[in-house]
Image (cartoon, rainbow, N blue to C red):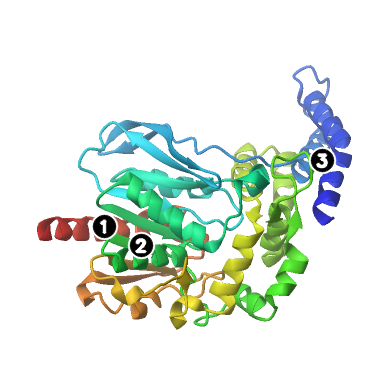
Amino acid sequence: MLYAMHELNYAMFSPWNMMAKANLAALSSPWNPFPSSPLRAYLAASNDLFLRMTRRYEKPAFGITEIEAGGQKVAIDQQTVLERPFCRLLHFVRGSATGLPKVLLVAPLSGHHATLLRDTARTFLQDHDVWITDWTDARQVPVAAGSFHFDDFVNYVRDFVHFIGPATNVVAVCQPAVPVMAAVSLMAAARDPLAPPTMTLMGGPIDTRTGPTSVNRFAEQRSSEWFERNFIQTVPPPHPGCMRLVYPGFLQHACFVAMNADKHVKAYQDYFNHLVEGDDDSAAAHRVFYDEYNAVLDLPGEFYLDTVRRVFQNHDLPLGTLVVDGEKVMPQLITDTALLTIEGERDDITGQGQTVAAHDLCTGLAPGQKKHFLALGVGHYGIFNGRKFREMIYPQVREFIRDHAATQAKAA
């Protein structure tokens, strides 16, 4: 019902949205007789802000067509190499990738599109052959395609590693840390020859009992039934996933904004002022950030409830009770996949200690196969995006992959 009301609300605003577009076009026209009028600037800013507050933000493009590596421009061709109902495996093909370490970036399925890792992928492409999981908006997946549970996420990771082939290094950003560790654990238990040489977990909730944040406390203080009753909605027509149970993107977005409401209100106030003052560079920077931040996707309802229960409430992985498709997950069996964990000092979503907890679970790894890096002054999104990621964190990951890939190659 709530989902249908949201869609109705969007439809009701559509005529006003179109009027605001027409107003903005007229006010911005070179034929406007009062181009320098303060009133014109105020009216144009008001219509622009209204448009951004009422529009639907579609999935952005990765837009990675070239990178700079070794002082030269290198062309990049994005290709879909494998497609499943709930995810596409993308390969950023570069002509000079021969001999570069292969990396699978596992993007979070937690509200935003995989394009949130655009800067992450672009940075890794300097020194690696890169693939990424591009999760599908659940409202676009017909009910006939079946359900998608936590176990399916784990199986997707294993399948993608097998598809990419030998010596595929896996990097999990935030939420996928638990299913990625589960996948690698199951591959180790099966003595899978394609088990990754390295596993990097960045800001992931391995054990949320350590350094709990407001997100963790929110999950623990409510039952699974409460989450199902309040967050799970049915996709209305005319979307292809009509009648699918999902955790809607608009509810997730509301939660994201509520966590730092004052910050977002100020950002929009500043944006309005930048428009009025003619500060085009600052206004453009706002658009770039919020075009991505406001673009959200629906999660499969069963996957969301599985994650809440198994990761944030029951703590199945750290307590040794996690079972995937009837098989117990045992990280202690990992012996050949080196482990790197990354945490941000100011992370308010995945608190300090939650990711490094993976080291205590991987008892089969020698000390030289495990490394932890705490990024000082870095928040959650800074772990995988922005200047501090590129200058402080990425070099740690690059050298770790390079060192352990070489070590494994010698052993082979």
Q: CA distance from mark 1 to mark 3?
A: 49 Å
- The residue labelled by disc 1 is 401
Q: In terms of sequence position, does the residue under pointer 3 or pointer 2 come before the other?
A: 3
Question: Could you tell me residue 66's position as x and y percent?
Answer: 38, 32
| Residue found 59% across the figure and 39% down from its top | 281
Element class at badge 3: helix
Structural distance between the alpha carbons of marks 3 and 2: 45 Å
* Cα distance in 3D space between marks 1 and 2: 9 Å
Badge nearest the viewer, 3 or 2: 2
Report whether 238 appears left or right of 347. Answer: right
Q: Which residue is at 64% across, 37% downward? A: 280
> Neighbour class for label 1 at 10 Å: few (<14), some, many (≥20)?
many
Q: Which residue does the numbered mark 3 point to in the structure image?
A: 46
Nearer-the-camera pick, 400 or 38 = 400
Looking at marks 1 and 3 on the same chain, the residue that comes earlier in the sequence is marked by: 3
Q: Residue at x 55, y 56 (%)?
A: 109
The amino acid type of the residue labelled 3 equals: Ser
Verify CB contact (< 8 Å) between mark 3 and mark 2: no
Does 158 sit above or below residue 18? below
**Would you place residue 261 above or below residue 215 in this image?**
above
Vertical arrangement, residue 77 with respect to residue 55, above or below: above
Number of labelled discs? Answer: 3
Which quadrant of the rendered structure holds the C terminus? bottom left
Circles 1 and 2 in contact, beta carbons < 8 Å:
yes
Residue position marked by numbered label 2 in the rendering: 200
Q: Earlier in the sequence, mark 1 or mark 2?
A: 2
Residue type at mark 2 is Thr
